[in-house]
Image (cartoon, helix red, strand yellow):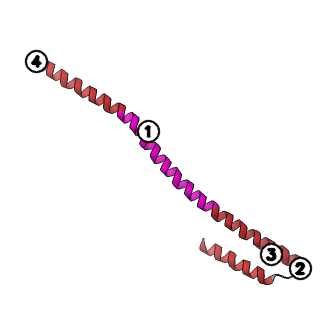
Amino acid sequence: MDIIQVILAVCGAISIVGGAGAVLWKLILPAFRLTKRVTKLEEHTETDYKRLLALEEMQKQQSKSLAALLNHQITGNGIESMKKIRDELLESIIDK
């Protein structure tokens, strides 16, 4: 009879520890998943921001080019400024 009580006590202890472990696991695991997701989203945000800055710079250079072309179309002058803008645009394209 003593052996049965010991076995039942051990089984009870195992079930209590297992239940507590399961509860802790269910509480802690979402926090780890959330941390991983936030880290990944921060990386994507940084990458997207860099791309947006690059696109903005490219758009500025295209606007300069368009303005130089319009000026040349109207006056027939401005060839030197067009060459300078062309060089800047080519340099920008090569760098990216």
Image quadrant where residue 66 sits: bottom right
Distance from disc 2 to disc 3, alpha carbons, whole Å, reads 10 Å
Res. 2 mark: 4
Q: Residue at x 19, y 25 (%)?
A: 10
User: Could you say whether the residue bearing mark 2 is in a helix, strand or loop?
Assistant: helix
* Residue highlighted by disc 2: 75
* Residue highlighted by disc 3: 68
N-terminal-most mark, 4 or 3? 4
Q: Does the magenta run of residues contain 18?
A: no
Q: Residue at x 59, y 57 (%)?
A: 48
Residue 41 x, y percent position in the rendering: 53, 50
N-terminal-most mark, 1 or 4? 4
Task: Check contact, mark 1 vs mark 3: CB within 8 A.
Answer: no
Left or right of 83, for residue 93:
left
Distance from disc 2 to disc 4, alpha carbons, whole Å, reads 109 Å
N-terminal-most mark, 2 or 4? 4
Distance from disc 1 to disc 3, alpha carbons, whole Å, reads 56 Å
Q: Which residues are magenta?
A: 24-52
Quadrant in the picture for the N terminus: top left
Q: Given the image, on which type of amino acid does mark 1 rest?
A: Pro
Near mark 2 (Cα within 10 A), the count class, few <14, some 14-19 or many ≥20, is few
The single residue placed furthest to the bottom in the displayed view is 80
* Residue highlighted by disc 1: 30
